[in-house]
Amino acid sequence: MISVKEAQAHLFDLTTPLSTEIVRLEHACGRVLSKDVVADRDQPPFASSAMDGYAIARKVVAVGDIFHIIGEAAAGHRFERPISADQAVRIFTGAPVPEGTQRILIQEDVERDRDKIAVGNDLDPNLYIRPSGGDFKVGHVVKAGIILQPSNIALLAAMNTCLVKIVKKPVVALISTGDELVMPGETPLSDQIIASNTYGLAALLENNGAEARIFPIARDTLTSLQYVFDLAQDADLIVTIGGASVGDHDLVAEASANLGMQQSFYKVAMRPGKPLMAGKIHNRAIVGLPGNPVSAMVCGHVFLVPMIKKLLGLSNVLPETYETVLLNDVEANRARTHYCRAVLSSDGIRVAEQQDSSLLSVLVNANALAIREPNAPPAKAGEPIKYMQL
Ligand code: AMP
Ligand code: MG
């Protein structure tokens, strides 16, 4: 049995970053930028007014000073002539400031009488001129390798970008296996349960930038498994769920071996999730997850999400781990790393009492996995503990 770290390293060996595609900016949010974008303009491209008010050619003014209004500048419509010391131009937010402007008097700070303004009391000391290039200048770089957020999209738009090069979405085939399974919405027979893992994993992987495809459930026969594997050959990553142990009906390893899988490893020293299997079929990574719902989801967080990140060409692909204090006592751990469902709060972390790997209701109430190292001795409330967030 290999360690979690070793398993992650093997999985990364099976995974090569994907190629790129070009999409319109409005379709790029959440995607990984694969080529630097460089600004070829300044923003704003001219000094502009930050307020509605009056542009004047002086910085220092006193209460009662009078200025003559000689024209107007609005956003998109500059006032073409320079202004002199006793003149003012009515100006609105975003308008280019006229030549000679040193300050904008905001409209609340002056008294207007037809084409004159007089400076009032209690003057706002800000000058309210936004310099040319004050937001970004020609040559400003948005670096490749980031996941584009709405604010990045806004910045790229301001840079006059309409097409961006991004990494293709990893397509993940999710295959549930088991005679006992039906899809949500179907009518289960008395011995059947609903295939929940495919749905939970699809959601997790889509949240992390993948395109998840849920395939028909493979039955516990070699024919059925091989049939569904064949359907999934176009995916960048094939994930099977269940049938990975050594029971008589656990046929995933045999079916994938029949299709030419080169196995990378089988079994990881972790709880939940021990019967994890991985390899390559026709140059594509295949990962066989255990069927218990919590095992499948924990393996999703610990192994599949990092693989998706690697396929997307991201750096720092492993789950971040942090340290906090235990809020309850925990027993000694056995030989496998234990990812305990736990609730993290500002006081520390409380490990859930029930750790059975079939209990989705416990997973739902957890927001973290407390990580117990192999053979860790019992630990008391107040002691430090490592965790990762869910
Ligand atoms: P297996 O790994 O096939 O032995 O399955 C272990 C347990 O997980 C069994 O109780 C299965 O019924 C259950 N199981 C397997 N696949 C799924 C699935 N896709 N959704 C929910 N439960 C599953
Ligand atoms: Mg099964």
Image: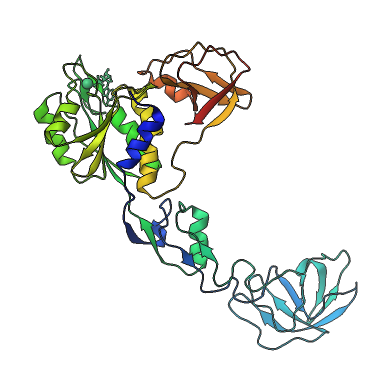
Residue farthest right in this picture: 63
Which is more toward the observer, 109 or 288? 288
Residue farthest bottom in this picture: 81
Is residue 203 at least partly visible in the picture? no
| Residue drawn 49% across the image and 63% down it | 156
Depicted 222 relative to depicted 331: above or below:
below
Depicted 355 relative to depicted 15: above or below:
above
Residue 190, position in %: x, y?
A: 20, 14
Which is more toward the observer, 349 or 335? 335
Residue 159, position in %: x, y?
A: 51, 68
Question: Quadrant location of ligand 1?
Answer: top left
Which is more toward the observer, 146 or 187? 146
Q: How are the residues colored?
A: rainbow
Q: Is residue 334 left or right of residue 21?
A: right
| Residue drawn 65% across the image and 87% down it | 80
Q: Is residue 179 left or right of residue 311?
A: left
Residue farthest left in this picture: 223
| Residue drawn 15% across the image and 32% down it | 257
How many dots with numbers? 0
Q: Quadrant of residue 72?
A: bottom right
Residue 321, position in %: x, y?
A: 52, 32
Is residue 73 at least partly visible in the picture? yes
Q: Quadrant of residue 235?
A: top left
Quadrant showing the N terminus: top left
Residue 294, position in %: x, y?
A: 37, 23
Depicted 86 relative to depicted 118: above or below:
below
Which is more toward the observer, 58 or 206? 206
